[in-house]
Structure formats: C-alpha cells, structure tokens
Image (spheres, rainbow, N blue to C red):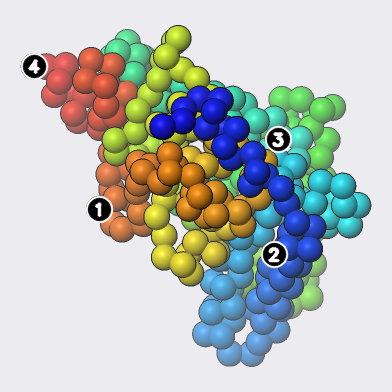
Amino acid sequence: MRTGQDLINATVPFTEASTRVSWWHVGSTFAMLAAALTGAGVLAWWPLRLACSVLAALLMARTFITFHDYMHRAILVRSRVARVLFSVYSALSLTPPRSWKKSHNYHHGHVGQISSVSVGAFPMMTTKMWREATRAERASYRIIRHPLTLLAGYFTIFFLNVTLLPLLQDPKHHWDSLLALVGHAALITVLWLVGGFATAFFVVLLPMTIASALGSYLFYAQHSFKDMHILQGDEWSYPDAAMESSSYLKLNRVMQWFTGNIGFHHIHHLNVRIPFYRLPEAMAAIPELQSPITTTLKPRDILDCFRCCLWDEERQKVVSYREAARFAAA
C-alpha cells in the first residue's frame, strides 16, 4: 500500500486537464446559472421564480467549485478569458481572490492541525485546551462552529470572514475585497431598482443564502466528522492529514454533480491540481484512495458531524462538549 509521497505521485497523472473538457464544464455551468437566474428574475408566477432560485443556488455551488479549481491552478491556467470570467464572478459573489487564496492555501497547508482560532477553516481545540480556555474563548469557539453560523454563511462566512474583515485588517493588500463588496451591493441595488425587492430576493439574496449555507456545511463536514483522526507534532504530514483528517462525502449522482465532486475531499487534499471532474477517476484507479472515512448528508451523519467538537488526545477521537465534560468528571 502506497503512502506519503508515493501516494501523491500516484495521483500526478490525473492532474492533466483538458482545456476542451474544462471549458465544457465551466461554460455549461455558467450558462445554466445565467438561465436559472433569469427565470428567477423575470417569471411572473412566484412558485416558478422560487424553483429557479433554488436551482440557481445549487448551480452557484457548482460555479464556486469551478472558481475554486481555477484558483488552485487545476483548470484553465493560461486562459485570459477564464481570468476575466472568474474576476467578474469574484467581484459579484463575495469571493475576493486575495483573501480566499491566502486563507484557503493556509488551510491546505495545515489541515488536521489543532487550533483555537479560525484561519481558513473551522478551528479544532483539544479537550485540554477547552478546559483551560476562558469563558470568552469558549463562547467564540462555540459560535464559530455552531450550526446557525453555517446556516447564515452568506453573512458570517462569505460577507464577514472572507470579504469584510480582511479588508478592515489590511485595506492595501485586500483592495479586491472592497471591489467585491461594491460589486455585490451594486448588483442587489440595480435588481431592486429595476424589478423591486422580489427580483433582488429571488435572483441574489435567496440563492446566495442557500448556496452559502450548503457550501459552509460541506466545508465543515469535510474536516469535522466521526472517526476522523488528528495528527499532532511530528506525526503530522501533508499526505497523512489528507487521508485521515479529510472526509469522503458520499452523495448521490445529482448532488455529486451540483457540488462539483468536492465530496472526494481526501483526494483533493492529497493533490489540489487534480481537476474536479477527474477526482472520481482518480479514486477508481488508485486502490489506496478507495477506503476513506465516509460521511453523507443523511440527518444522522449531519448530527454526528456537529457533535465532533473537540479532539480528545487521551482517547484519540473527536468528542462532543458533553462527552468532554463527562470524561473530565470521571
């Protein structure tokens, strides 16, 4: 069984991206999103507008994955058209490239590591750190990982953490965050003025709320799940963390398509240059990738993910706050 660098080397053949195939996925996704948003904006009957808005939300999730892969230099690396397209996308969708790239690259370089603060990922404390934390530190930690924070991801994650806070902390470097804020606000304003609140709601506010909540949970579940393993100190290595601290989110084919295969997250973390449309192919071809720690979108598995709050060093497992308190009292 290959491990470490040997396993990464086995994935290299799958990093070869086809420009034609990449453009097919990107172009068709953006075209369908544009059509769904148009329907949400112009149709007269509100149930149809709602249906188009929900469809647009799912397509926004897939659109984000294409942007995500472009930023990882997995697809369309030398395309000027792609650069323009994704620049416009980032300026309207609260995904400023500088902020996103900085935090996301940090996440990839530190996946599965213990941290009490959120830097590109949801933090993970040990039970010892939790016992020694102040009330304010515990409250902050709980809020960051709370289900309502993910449900409100449009505001809490994309508007606040990805866009506004980086701008306030370093305006000179994160000037594109200002562009994203202005662009997003201008889009909502124009839609509101032209078509009224309903148009702004169905075209931007509702689909962005749904897409952001879905994306926030997917990201959470990929690194906070039952049976995950945290490697600390000298034990930590990039390939081992990819396999043991990143989940395989098993989805049906429809949701797998809408989420751009991001459920194959252990493979993505092993090699970020694999295009999203080749991740299933890599898993099918490499035996060592075929037995990952798995989670799903079933209610039981979602609850299990939200119960994975702290890393118990003694028991070498993730535990809930209640379990941590019970073990401490025993």
Q: CA distance from mark 1 to mark 2?
A: 33 Å
Q: Is residue 235 left or right of residue 14?
A: left
Dot 1: within a 10 Å radius of its alpha carbon, few (fewer than 14), some, or many (20 or more) residues? Answer: few
Residue bearing mark 1: 300
Query: Between tags 4 and 2, which lies in front?
Result: 2
Instruction: Give the Cα distance between marks 2 and 3.
Output: 22 Å
Question: What residue occupies the far front of the structure in this picture?
Answer: 1
The Cα–Cα distance between marks 4 and 3, rounded to whole angstroms, is 44 Å
Residue type, mark 2 in image: His
Residue occupied by mark 4? 330
In the image, residue 38 sits, relative to residue 10, either above or below, namely: below
Find the distance from the CA under tag 1 to the CA under tag 4.
Answer: 27 Å
Q: Determine whether the residue tagged by mark 3 lies in a helix, strand or loop.
A: helix
The reply to whether discs 1 and 2 touch (Cβ–Cβ < 8 Å) is no
Between disc 1 and disc 2, the foreground one is 2
Question: On residue 101, which mark appears?
Answer: 3
Q: Quadrant where the C terminus lies? A: top left
Identify whether 89 is placed above or below 101.
Answer: below
